[in-house]
Image (tube, grey):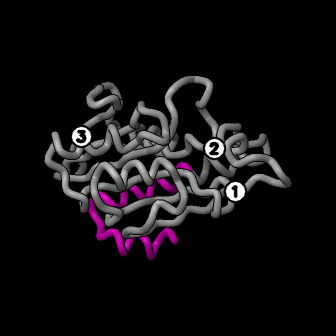
């Protein structure tokens, strides 16, 4: 089984913001795999499908970013998912727009959504796909930066990056994650 979790904030006011890039990737993945995101459980919206004999869950926590683990932990326990099944997709300030980075495990790196998931699943030993959103220029506060949409110039790059990240997810369903890392990092 595989569980792809895209991080973001619910609500139209957050749609297309930098912080919601994880939601965008899971939505793109849902289109590619034809898995509708129509079910709700544990304060999350999700879909379930089967890809080449592998059960696949796509999940968008509706808890707001900083409490993402409150949806992910109970969801994993209910469906008896292992840490090895989990792949989290989220925004990363330290990567330029257009870049993605895949990792087998790691710390939260200051990301509150990841801190919450680590706390609720009891480990940081799970796969992740970090999607670059860039850093704010000048003295703009980070919180304001991540809750703003991408610029008109960045949007085409972001759209391609979302497709690339979704493709990496698709490959991770049937291929070893280290192979996918080598192909996409």
| Residue shown at the point (35%, 31%) measured from the top left | 44
Q: Where is residue 117 in the image (x, y as percent from the top left)?
A: 37, 50
Mark 1 lies on a secondary structure that is loop
Q: Helix, strand, or loop for circle 3?
A: helix
What residue is drawn where x is 29% and y is 70%? 176
Q: Which of marks 3 and 1 is nearer the N terminus?
A: 3
Going from the N terminus, do you reach mark 2 or mark 3 first?
2
Question: Is disc 2 placed on a helix, strand or loop?
Answer: helix
> Which dot marks residue 134?
1
Disc nearest the viewer among 3 and 1:
3
Residue corresponding to mark 3: 74
Report crowding for label 3: few under 14, some 14 to 19, many 20 or more residues within 10 A (C-alpha): some
- For the point 30% across and 55% down, which residue is it? 86
Residue 178 lies in the magenta-colored region: yes
Q: What stretch is highlighted in magenta?
A: 162-185
The residue furthest right is 138
**Magenta region's main secondary structure?**
helix
Q: In which quarter of the image is residue 174?
A: bottom left
Estimate how packed mark 2 is, as few (under 14), some (14 to 19) or many (20 or more) residues with alpha carbons within 10 Å: many
x and y percent of residue 122 in the render? 28, 57
* Alpha-carbon span between mark 2 and mark 3: 26 Å
Q: Name the residue under label 2.
A: 18
User: Relative to 78, does residue 106 appear above or below in the rendering?
Assistant: below
Say if 154 sits above or below 185 in the image.
above
Marks 2 & 1, CB-CB < 8 Å contact: yes
């Amino acid at each position: 089984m595989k569980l792809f979790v895209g991080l973001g904030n619910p609500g139209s006011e957050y749609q297309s913001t930098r912080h919601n890039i994880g939601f965008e990737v899971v939505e793109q993945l849902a289109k590619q795999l034809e898995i509708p995101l129509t079910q709700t459980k544990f304060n999350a919206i999700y879909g379930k499908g089967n890809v080449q004999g592998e059960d696949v869950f796509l999940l968008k926590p509706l808890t707001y970013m900083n409490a993402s683990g409150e949806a992910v932990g109970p969801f994993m326990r209910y469906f008896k998912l292992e840490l090895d099944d989990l792949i989290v997709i989220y925004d990363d300030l330290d990567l330029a727009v257009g870049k993605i980075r895949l990792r087998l495990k790691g710390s939260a790196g200051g990301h509150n959504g990841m801190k919450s998931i680590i706390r609720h699943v009891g480990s940081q030993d799970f796969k992740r796909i970090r999607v670059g959103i860039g850093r704010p220029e000048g003295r703009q506060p980070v919180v304001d930066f991540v809750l703003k949409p991408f610029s008109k110039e960045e949007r085409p790059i972001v759209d391609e990056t979302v497709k690339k990240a979704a493709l990496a997810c698709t490959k991770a369903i049937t291929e070893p994650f280290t192979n996918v890392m080598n192909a996409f990092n």
